[in-house]
Amino acid sequence: MEVKNIMNTQKLLIFGKDNKKLEKINDWYYDQHDHEAKISSFSLPAGYSCPAAKDCQAFFNPKTRKILDGKNQKYRCYAASDERYEAVRNKVWHNFDLLKPIRNNKQAMFNLLNDSIKANKHTYRSQIIRLSVHGDLFTYEYLEAWIKIAKLYPKKIIYGYTKSLHFLKKYIDENGSLPVNFRMVASQGGKYDHLLKHFKRVANVVFNESDAIYPIDSDERYALNETPQPFSLLIHGNQKAGSDAMQAIIKIRKEKAAL
């Protein structure tokens, strides 16, 4: 209900704070910086804002209250399941509804993002902004707007995971490189995997730790590290009943319970 009230009166974007995974950042961040990091997050609807999704493709339909899985899905995007909760759903659609009409206008999106950051005391003071907890880079101009934010706030680390590798590649081809504080992870399992070879900060999802050929990142240290390298993520979130992904989740839960 609180989110609905905000949506009815506010024409700014809504940022979130850290979640359980993001909280783990401070397990190691404090040792490196002698203070805890303030962390903000930003989300759009899963699936609907993910033009390059494939292996994880899923949508939560706000009208039917059901999840629609992509035809090539290997595991369900955890964010689509989270959008079953009204507060989460209201927030991501509020953001998307504000951005969609200006999705091809870099300056308008930059202005909206910057106004929203400045109006949110926690986000303005955050050292880290996690992009696309839900959703992805849904237009090239949206990527450009966030990069412009990164340049405006060079002391903030802006990071996330993306399968929109075609947008990242285009920007690098046209501009030479990304800002050092803009650390998007090229996520394997999308429509543009043939472009993965162009990136060093790459992540793939594995169903078992034994399947990982790269270090497993459980606290975002590899995602945030200034020196990029490939890493793996262990499958997580609610998965489709009876799927291989769900069986992997059940196995992981049993192994944790046995510790």
Image (cartoon, rainbow, N blue to C red):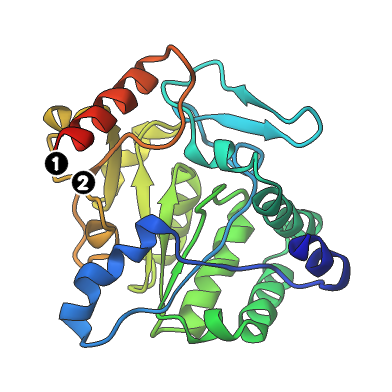
Q: Is residue 5 left or right of residue 189?
A: right
Measured in 3D between alpha carbons, the distance from the residue under mark 1 to the one under mark 2, in whole angstroms, is 5 Å
Confirm or deny contact between disc 1 and disc 2 (CB under 8 A).
Answer: yes
Q: Which mark is residue 172?
A: none
Q: For the N terminus, give its image quadrant.
A: bottom right
Looking at this view, name the residue that lies furthest to the top.
Answer: 242
Residue 105 vertical placement versus 157 (above, below): above
Q: Tell me the quarter of the picture where residue 203 sits.
A: top left
Residue 245 vertical placement versus 167 (above, below): above
Residue ID at (22%, 35%): 257
How many neighbours does mark 1 have within 10 angstroms: few (below 14), some (14-19), or many (20 or more)?
some
Tell me, yes or no, if residue 51 can be seen here. no
Residue ID for mark 1: 214
Between 112 and 139, the one lying in front of the other is: 112
Between 130 and 252, the one lying in front of the other is: 252
Question: At numbered mark 2, what does the secondary structure look like: helix, strand or loop?
Answer: strand
Question: At numbered mark 1, what does the secondary structure look like: helix, strand or loop?
Answer: loop
Where is residue 101? Give x, y as percent.
81, 56
Residue ID at (48%, 38%): 78
Q: Earlier in the sequence, mark 1 or mark 2?
A: 1
Between 52 and 140, the one lying in front of the other is: 52
Where is residue 75? Give x, y as percent.
42, 25
How many neighbours does mark 2 have within 10 angstroms: few (below 14), some (14-19), or many (20 or more)?
many
Q: Is residue 131 left or right of residue 9?
A: left
Q: Is residue 210 left or right of residue 196?
A: left
Q: Tag count in the figure?
A: 2
- Identify the amino acid type marked 1: Tyr
Residue ID for mark 2: 231
